[in-house]
Amino acid sequence: MEVFKGTLLLLLLLLLLHLHSTEPLRLVGGASRCAGTVEVRHRGEWRRVEQSGPWFLDHTAAVCRDLDCGSAVYGEQRHDFPLSPVWRVTSVCVKTSAVKECVDGSSSSSSGLEVKCSDSVRLVSGPSLCSGSVQIWDQSWTWVCEGALDQQGAEVLCRELGCGAPSLLQGALSPLGQTFHCEGHESALMDCPRSSSGTCSSGAAVNLTCSEPLRLVGGASRCAGTVEVRHRGEWRRVEPYRPWALEHTAAVCRDLDCGSAVYGEKRHDFPLSPVWKVSPDCVKTSAVKECVDGSSFSFSSSSSGLEVKCSDSVRLVSGPSLCSGSVQIWDQSWTWVCEGALDQQGAEVLCRELGCGAPSLLQGALSPLEQTFHCEGHESALMDCPRSGTETCSSGAAVNLTCSEPIRLVGGASRCAGTVEVRHRGEWRRVVPYRLFGSWFLDHTAAVCRDLDCGSAVYGEQRVDFPQSPVWRVSHDCVKKSAVRECVDDFFSSSSSGLEVKCSDLLNRPVISLSVSDGDSEARPQGVQLLLGSKFKVKCSVEPQYPGGVFELLSPTAPLDQNHTLPAVNHSAHFLFSDTGPAHKGNYTCVYHLHVFNHSFSSQSPSLQLSLGGTSSNSLM
């Protein structure tokens, strides 16, 4: 019986070893099972992995996940391996699927992926790799309980994960009953002496936020300067390998806990030195550190870099664009500006500080009573204005401000038609798509109309006959979902190209109809035929929206008639014609003009075609 039990145990052990050996993913050549060169077993053969596409830290996190290791520390594609067969994997696939499921072919290569995961600690369920609830590996992953970690322990943990110093530590900071007794110099949390091994549920675990390993250097404040990231223990400038727009700068400001993005510029006059290459598309949704491209590691010396400016002490949050939202100021921490604390002059200062246009909507303000900020309007920053209080409030009682977008159409018949110009970094320039001969569709034009608060897009055309001059380049894809200013890319800024745009304006479209002048009110929406010598009238009308305005009738005889412009009476106007002749043939169109909100608006009706036939009659045919 004992022999049988021993044989059974041996068989179970061999089975376990076999199951372990069939694990289709491993890291080899590293200091632990959670560090080394990525290998996958596919079709019964172990090979190195070579990725197709960029390789970011979230791809490395997928490898760590499949290995049941800790958080991703770094991932790098190297090109110094012996030439040998490799498995090629799709990097996009590994973020959502097991690595072995992402093999899409094979090749012979000297490339491979070097990966490091933390061995025994990780942050889970957080918004980034540097934030979350703390778990340690102790035969299995277990939660670190509240009170088990002090500030020094948090510093060790953040450093181990390649993050910055701890900025928020919930359920800790108490020396009583703590599990880890770190001095701060340790390289890993599990190197610290431990005094207990209590377990707890996720709801009672320590929540830790480490600051992002990101900084701006050489600027006037911590929120302005050249972007640098610390990766693999080394600070380097950041170079984007695709165009960099204001929405990407906003991500840098977000990671630094600065204010709103004011501008971001790719410069090429830095000393030649190693840089970290990052993906602009990645930074919109992930921390900048997580967007360092390990596949570009070997091409990492450059004279390029990013110059960024965020507002230091004010920002608009939870709005549809960088120029709209609830107002917060920095006063040791971000606090809400309460209703009534900001008047029109203060709003003008704030909008100008953020690089936006004049305030167009200010809710919960405009009252001089008990206001906090007393601006004269010339100040360069809201916090330069005298303050009379420090009242705090919840987000629901905060001032909501909408600044107009710094965009305009020039040279057209109205403010909603013309050449597109954007004011960026204090300068108005024409706008061109940065793919010079890329298609500019009507949905791109619709974005311009949206930012101008005009109506729908009528047409948009890219022209190349402008004088050679500095321009702002914008991303096609970006403008469909973001304000045009947020899509400006400063790179390659001189061109003879430009965009001509026409929007339908803010107003309702007027309606045009034609009838005989003896009272017959029959309206014809399309073509109308009249007899020679007949009398008729054209009616222009618009649905009630705003009082006043004038109607202009565009007609074949408009230059000859004195009454081609009439005031709107009861939202309509009648243009009378007599003795119809050949000169009256052609298209008639109503244009409604209105001055409101300190702007002139226009809206145009469809055209109506008039033709002639027969001899004198006062009736429509």
Image (cartoon, helix red, strand yellow):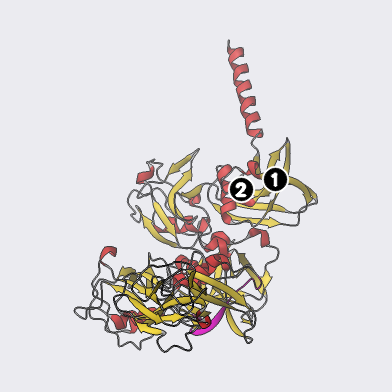
Q: Locate residue 520: give its quadrant.
A: bottom left
Q: Residue at x 54, y 67 (%)?
A: 442
Question: Is residue 489 located in the magenta-colored stretch of the structure?
Answer: no
Magenta part of the chain: 423-437
Callout 2 secondary element:
helix
Give residue 139's position: percent from left, percent from top.
50, 38
Give residue 193's position: percent from left, percent from top.
45, 49
User: Looking at the image, is mark 1 or mark 2 earlier in the sequence?
Assistant: 2
Q: Residue under circle 1?
A: 104
* Left or right: where 384 falls relative to 105: left
Q: Residue at x 77, y 48 (%)?
A: 107
Give residue 551's position: percent from left, percent from top.
38, 80
Q: Residue under circle 2?
A: 93
- Tag 1: amino acid: Asp
The correct choice, above or below, for 167 with respect to 557 in the image is above
Main SS class of the magenta portion in the image: strand
Query: Closer to the camera, 506 or 50?
Result: 506
* Left or right: where 5 falls relative to 341: right
| Quadrant where the image shows the N terminus | top right
The correct choice, above or below, for 33 with respect to 280 in the image is above
Q: Residue at x 27, y 63 (%)?
A: 396
Label 2: few (<14), some (14–19) or many (≥20) C-alpha neighbours in 10 Å: some
Asked if marks 1 and 2 touch (Cβ < 8 Å), the reply is yes
Give residue 39's position: percent from left, percent from top.
69, 44
Residue extending furthest toward the left: 369
Question: Is residue 424 located in the magenta-colored stretch of the structure?
Answer: yes
- Tag 2: amino acid: Cys
Q: Is residue 293 something that shows in the picture? A: yes
Callout 1 secondary element:
strand
